[in-house]
Image: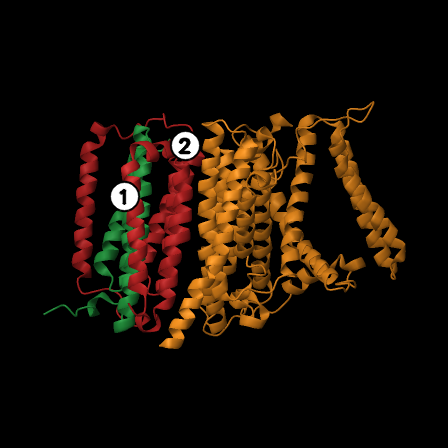
Chain colours: A red, B orange, C green
Amino acid sequence: MILNQVLFYFFALLAVGSAILMVTRRNIIHGAVFLISTLLATAGIFLQLQAEFLFVVQIILYVGGIMVLFVFVIMLVNLDVALRQIQFNRQKYLAAVLALVLAAQVGFALWVARAGLNLSNPSDKMPARNTEAIGDAIFQRYMLPFEIASVLLLVAMIGAVVMAKRRV
Amino acid sequence: MGHLIPSSIAPYVLPVVYAVVIVAVLPLLAGYIVLLERKVMADMQARLGPMRVGPHGLLQPIADALKLLIKEDIIPANADKLMFWLAPLVSVTMALLAYAALPIGPSFQIADLNVGLLFILGISSLGIYGIVLGGWASNSHYSLLGALRSAAQLVSYETAAGLGLVSALLLAGSLSMKEIVQAQYDQGTWFIFSVPVGFFIYMVGSIAETNRAPFDLPEAESELVAGYMTEYSGFRWSLYFLAEYANMIIVAGIATTLFLGGWLRPFARWHDHFPGTSLEFFDVIPSLVFLAAAAYCFYLAPKQPVQIQKAVMAAFGGACLLLAGAMAAALLASPEVMAGVHGAFWFMAKVVAYLYAFLWFRFTFPRYRFDQLMRLGWRFLIPLALVNVISIGIAIVLKQSLGWIPFWAMLVMNIVTLGVAAWLATEGDKPEAALQTADTES
Amino acid sequence: MIPTEAYLILSLALFTIGVVGVLTRRNVIIVLMSIELILNAVNINLVAFSRHFGSVDGQVFAIFIITDAAAEAAVGLGIILAFFRNRETVLADEMDMLKW
């Protein structure tokens, strides 16, 4: 029980801290490394929520695939010039205020709804075998979104190859 | 002993002990695999290899480790210090973390995850960051090019290796490593005999994953100095080295668990007895192997030129005798202990056999050029792996719904896959010829 | 067991940081990374509710979001590479060729 709480606070603080550091770094590679740290902390949160398959999918796809793509592109784009420029644009204060207003709105909605949704009482009847349950759900109830996702990936593959070619 | 440990931490004691054992033993084991590699390389090149440090070079890894520890730590001038420090750390951490889900015997596993196989694959794919960040942080052309090439190679062959594993997973029906070995026991065959094409794809993919020859262009000395490891020296380099050999043992462990029966002894379901006892033939093989090793050590001991080498050789012989005694004693203990000890022996034997194949390939095949490497990965292995998955799926449908005998279903679909492989291997020549003529015309 | 609202607050915090990153930074690569952060925050929210109601539907939706994020990152980075080859800049302020 206590280990559960310690782990949650560890992952949550790591995620939020790395996110703040990512958004404020001058060096883009450092920002990418902090995003990797945030994504790994999120994977830990998924494991705590008993989503084992999503935990490994997050690590393999997000950290091991998407972030590798980001790091490759950052290395191919010349960083030295960007390091010496101003990092934040002209509307930074207005943006921060608006983001805080958004957070306050959502927080207020959560506060008003906490009794109605009974949020302090999560159910404990998750299916026992997580991977098999997700497999059943994807291939029976969510078959159409699965097929559409594969078409989306094909389109994205073609699009990325076309966009990154030197001469079309 | 059980009531001295409070129940709140009791489930964590044994995994922590296993983890400490693995982290303590692994650098030593990696060092001895390096020695094995040098001796095997020497044997295949008709020479002797390290002979000086310790008898027959047996203390060479310790000398190498001491040398690396006391070397000067050089950091390039404009290197990114945070990344330079972090990169070998990431490599080693991910390589060691993958051992958390690897079962070295029926009772020697740190954590039996439901998704153990995917966990190991995911953590191994995180090792790419150690390479890419190390190459970037070194602020040198060789390092960056080597790192990008190495990362591209790893990403390409990861897909093929994963699909090769999926074909064996279809037969196993679960991602938990223990259940995969149990499925091989229940079906009576190792999966290498059911999906040999999958094993071949995984073997080629794992050789490329660990940057071993013939796929070692990113770290070959004649090509890019040492690739991403160029600017690292001393202890940081030894961390990269340890990560590479730990990765080799992990992929050997995955191949053993999925394709070679894990900790099952050969003919696990066939029981025979020596007359008058309850010993089985395959159960005495571990002790016999260690006895033979001890006898060889004692035979070589008097022939050493130096007195202390005689003593070290005799000590190694004594250690082999102790292990032989441990294997024999396990026969007399309870079935769980025997299964655990003998299971660990068979698992390590299969891992060593797989690693010997790695070493054999290194000194037999010439190196692939980088474009040939990428072409092999994307245009041969990945289509072959996809066809393999589909054909094994068809075989399972034939087996379960149409009632074919499993042997014939697997045989027919494997022959179909081999036919597709032959077509894939030869069809790549024609587009290259078309490109050649197009270039000469324009 | 950790109550669901703890995960919702964590998700809200990450979402806000992501929104600040998207609206504030000039470097479009960091803007793309902040978009990934926003998608992650939404994933945490979905999985928390999936555990709250005891079904895997939230996790399936999260898998589709991860797939979507991969596709979007690939195409977005391809566009950034193509733009960088032409104009030698990755700052959002300087990508103003279509302005009057």
Crowd around label 2: few <14 · some 14–19 · many ≥20 (10 Å): some
Residue A24 visible (yes or no): no
Q: Which mark is residue B356?
A: none
Give how far across and how far down residue B105 sits, in percent.
Answer: 63, 36
**Residue B430 image-quadrant placement:** bottom left
Give how far across and how far down residue B372 sits, in percent.
Answer: 49, 64
Give how far across and how far down residue A36 sits, in percent.
Answer: 39, 53
Q: CA distance from mark 1 to mark 2?
A: 21 Å
**Residue B265 image-quadrant placement:** top right
Amino acid type indicated by mark 2: Glu
Residue located 29% across and 62% down the image: A162
Q: Secondary structure at mark 2?
A: helix
Taking depth in this image into account, of B97 and A143 the one nearest to the observer is: A143
Q: Is residue B389 left or right of residue C78?
A: right
- Taking B292 as reference, is C54 above or below it? above
Give how far across and how far down residue B199 sits, in percent.
Answer: 56, 45
Query: Which residue lies most toward the top here?
Result: B276
Residue located 82% across and 54% down the image: B312
- Quadrant position of the C terminus of chain C in the picture: bottom left
Q: Which residue is tagged 1?
A: A148
- Taking A63 as reference, is B233 above or below it? below
Residue C17 visible (yes or no): yes
Query: Which residue lies most toward the left here?
Result: C100
In front: label 1 or label 2: 1
Q: Which residue is tagged 2?
A: A132
> What is the chain identity of the residue bearing mark 2?
A
Residue located 26% across and 69% down the image: A86
- Quadrant position of the N terminus of chain C in the picture: top left
Chain-order first, disc 1 or disc 2: 2
